[in-house]
Image (tube, rainbow, N blue to C red):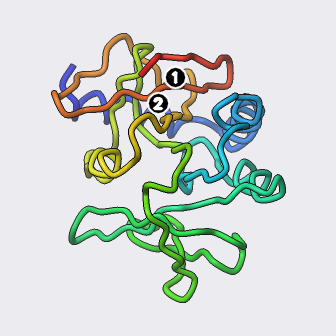
Amino acid sequence: MHKRALRKEILARRDRLSASEIAAWSKAIARRLLELPPYREAGTIMFFLSFGSEVDTGEMIEESLARGKRVLVPKTVPEERRLIPSELLDCAKDLAPGAYGIREPRPEALRPVAPCQIDLLIVPGVAFDLKGNRLGYGGGYYDRFFNRLRPGVPLVALAFELQLVEHVPVEPWDRRVDWLLTEKRAVHTAG
């Protein structure tokens, strides 16, 4: 299936989830993340800020801050299709709706951090296969960002089972995720 058609189909499927399903399944995914060795070993973690019917990262972020992790979130630069990792200290005070209606750091709360300081990257996506191939939203923000990380930094994707497909079409430059966490399982894809 072509990327655009696959993206449309999976997003429609995900958008049919109820708020209670998203909440319950996100909690199950959060538990898997907190048990994951790369998470436990990481000092600095960059999370995506969930929106719409995505896996809710709010509780994971709050728990990570409570555990003394250094938490980063992306600030988008739409004209350059670029992400700036910014240190998050307080969700309520630091964040406001930004590009695409997704929460991101307010200008006065922007605390840029060099990508080389990231130990673990939690990535969003529309569809995934069990080999770790990822279909994003089409903007290329994360694809560009992956190249700025230190070699070997684990990529962990959070998704609902209904986002898993047999095969995600890939381009030569696409990077696989190392871990795929759903409400039912943790899959080490070996990136």
Q: Quadrant of residue 188?
A: top right
Furthest-top residue in view? 166
Q: Amino acid at mark 1?
A: Leu
In the shown orientation, is residue 172 left or right of residue 165? left
Q: Residue at x 39, y 38 (%)?
A: 151
- Residue at 30% across, 63% down: 82
Query: Which residue occupies 67% across, 50% down?
Result: 43
Residue 13 - label: 2
Front residue of this view, candidates 36 and 162: 36
Which amino acid type is marked by label 2?
Arg
Does residue 50 lie above or below 42 as drawn?
below
- In the visual, does 171 lie left or right of 69? left
**Residue drawn 73% across and 37% down?**
40
**Distance between the Cα atoms at labels 2 and 1?**
7 Å
Kindly state the secondary structure of the residue where label 1 is placed: helix
Mark 2 touches mark 1? (CB < 8 Å): yes
Identify residue for label 1: 162
Q: Secondary structure at mark 2?
A: helix
Residue 5, given in percent of the width and then of the height, sits at 24, 30
Q: Position of residue 15 (x, y in %)?
A: 50, 40
- Label 2 vs 1, first from the N-terminus: 2
Considering every residue shown, the one lying at the far right of the view is 66
- Say which quarter of the image contains residue 87: bottom right
| Between 5 and 187, the one nearer to me in the picture | 187
| Label 1 environment density (alpha carbons within 10 Å; few <14, some 14–19, many ≥20) | some
Which quarter shows the N terminus?
top left
139 or 153, which is in the foreground?
153
Nearest to the observer: residue 12 or residue 155: 155
Quadrant housing residue 152 = top left
Mark 2 crowd level (few <14, some 14–19, many ≥20, 10 Å Cα): few
Position of the C terminus, as image quadrant, is: top left
Q: From this viewpoint, which residue is outermost toward the bottom?
A: 108
